[in-house]
Amino acid sequence: MDTVDPHVLNIVAGIVIVALVVAAIWLFMRKKQTEHLEQRFGPEYGRTVNELGSRDKAEAELRNREKRVDQLKLVPLSPGDANQFWQEWRSLQGRFVDNPKGVLADADRLVRVLMEKRGYPMGDFDRRAADVSVHHPGVVEHYRAAQAIALKDRNGEADTEEQRRAVVHYRALFDELLEVQDPRRDARSTEPGHTQETRHEFNA
């Protein structure tokens, strides 16, 4: 009976070992990528998996969102612009108490203007929500809920309580997007004990 050449066995064993190492590396990288996406997108990860029906498709979609948004030139607001937006929102909320008609459309418009000012492109709603989910996954469901009620409102089908809930949903997104660049940060960053993080707050 012929014997197998030991050199051939060594080659086969080497190929198998390399294949196993490559598979292990691939599985490790896949796991790390999944963990990254789950951590970054939170509940949005599970929602996308359920919507697309596949973890692979969902992760490809979320990676595409990251790549697309990374190419955008998103900028924080100046304190003056942020204050103007905040004053407009306070006026909007005040009008809702007396006459809610039309306020929901104004809230949607104001959020769009704010997004555009920050640097988000104004595509269709699904694209806007997807873009927002990259940096603000915690509030994107508020945006979707508000939009759903806004569509009912345009058809005259939303009651006052639904309109109120929609305004609350829009407010959650509005507050999240109202990020401000403090012009004094660069000067203060050289002071002892100063941290790079700054926060701009408004009185309600």
Image: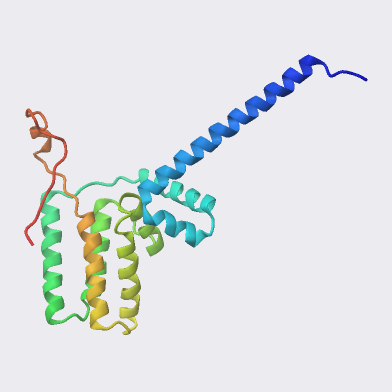
Picture quadrant of residue 24: top right
Looking at the image, residue 127 sits to the left or right of residue 108; the answer is right
Relative to 31, say whether 111 is above or below: below
User: Residue farthest to the front?
Assistant: 1
The residue sitting at 63% across, 25% down in the picture is 18
| Residue 128 percent coordinates (x, y) | 36, 59
Q: Quadrant of the C terminus?
A: bottom left
Q: Nearer the viewer, residue 178 or 32?
A: 32
Residue 71 appearing in the image: no
Relative depth, front residue between 80 and 157: 157
Query: Residue 66, percent across and down?
Result: 40, 46
Which colour style is shown?
Answer: rainbow
- The percent position of residue 111, horizontal first and vertical second, equals 25, 63
**How many badges with numbers are in the image?**
0
The answer to whether residue 169 is left or right of residue 65 is left
The relative height of residue 63 versus residue 196 in the rendered view (above or below) is: below
Q: Quadrant of residue 13?
A: top right
Q: Is residue 176 visible?
A: yes
Q: Nearer the viewer, residue 9 or 144?
A: 9
Task: Give me the residue at 45% from left, 41% from top.
Answer: 33
Q: Residue at x 25, y 52 (%)?
A: 118
Task: Relative to 141, say whether 201 is above or below.
Answer: above
Left or right: where 126 falls relative to 110: right
